[in-house]
Amino acid sequence: MLNVSSALFWLCLLIFISDFSHSTFEFTNIKCNSLDTSFATFEYCLLKSVNRTYKYGSLKVKLLKVPVDKVKLNLALYKRLNGYKPFLYNVTFDVCKFIQNRNSNRVAAFIFNLFQPYSNINHSCPCNHDVVVDKVPTSHMNEQLTKILPFPPGDYGFYSIWFGNGKPRATVNVYGTLS
Ligand SMILES: *[C@@H]1O[C@H](CO)[C@@H](O)[C@H](O)[C@H]1NC(C)=O
Ligand SMILES: *[C@@H]1O[C@H](CO)[C@@H](O)[C@H](O)[C@H]1NC(C)=O
Ligand SMILES: *[C@@H]1O[C@H](CO)[C@@H](O)[C@H](O)[C@H]1NC(C)=O
């Protein structure tokens, strides 16, 4: 039975949710760091504003000890509240296994979809070439973040640690604001 107060409740919920889906994402910073320069180095790691509506992030990792048979990714999502605090996940997954079966891990799928369409990471391991993520536009991040999960507005940090052949080799941290 739909009475007035429950109708109001659903209306408010709907407005609340649709409000999130109108939020916009902006990159604020990207930081790449090699933990082992004999294994991997960054040729570039940057954000660029082309104009008011087109801003993107790109990076290129040179892999110096190919082939890399095992790739793991640790990822944590932080939200800023007096310093960055853990928000959703701190997960580690096997990138090689995940690429073989994209349905095996929903969190991994969500993370991957943020940049995979703009990268050359679309085959299973071993990886025997440099890794490029080319011009991921804010519009894509926006779509992924707001359409799939209704994230509340705020400042976020995605912290990732990349493991190659069992050891931590590089970190990539991406910061952004959802408003
Ligand atoms: C921003 O730059 C992109 C790529 O050069 C272009 O397609 C787009 O029309 C530009 N937008 C504005 C508002 O100038
Ligand atoms: C996530 O957890 C791992 C393992 O407990 C830890 O090493 C890493 O620092 C954590 N990441 C962040 C960003 O806190
Ligand atoms: C990788 O990308 C290429 C070019 O977009 C495509 O032809 C190929 O089918 C993709 N491979 C996989 C395993 O998705």
Image (tube, helix red, strand yellow):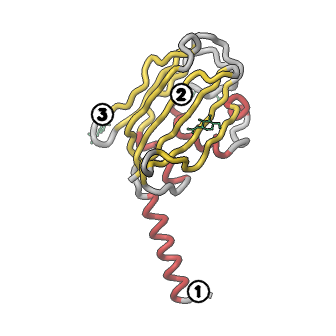
Of the residues under marks 3 and 1, which one precedes in the sequence? Answer: 1
Q: Residue at x 35, y 37 (%)?
A: 55
Residue 139 picture location, percent across and down: 42, 44
Q: Quadrant of ligand 3?
A: top right
Q: Mark 1 = which residue?
A: 2
Residue 104 picture location, percent across and down: 73, 41
Write down the quadrant of residue 127 in the picture. Answer: top right
How crowded pointer 1 is (Cα within 10 Å; few <14, some 14-19, many 20+) is rated as few
| Label 3 CB-ligand 1 distance < 8 A | yes
| Lateral position of residue 80 relative to residue 71, left or right | left
Query: Helix or strand or loop: what does disc 1 sit on?
Result: loop
Q: Mark 2 = which residue?
A: 171
Residue 49 picture location, percent across and down: 31, 34
Q: Mark 3 = which residue?
A: 50
Which quarter shows the N terminus? bottom right
What amino acid is labelled 3 in the image? Answer: Val
Foreground tag (3 vs 2): 2
What amino acid is labelled 2 in the image? Answer: Thr
Q: Residue at x 48, y 41 (%)?
A: 157
How crowded pointer 3 is (Cα within 10 Å; few <14, some 14-19, many 20+) is rated as few
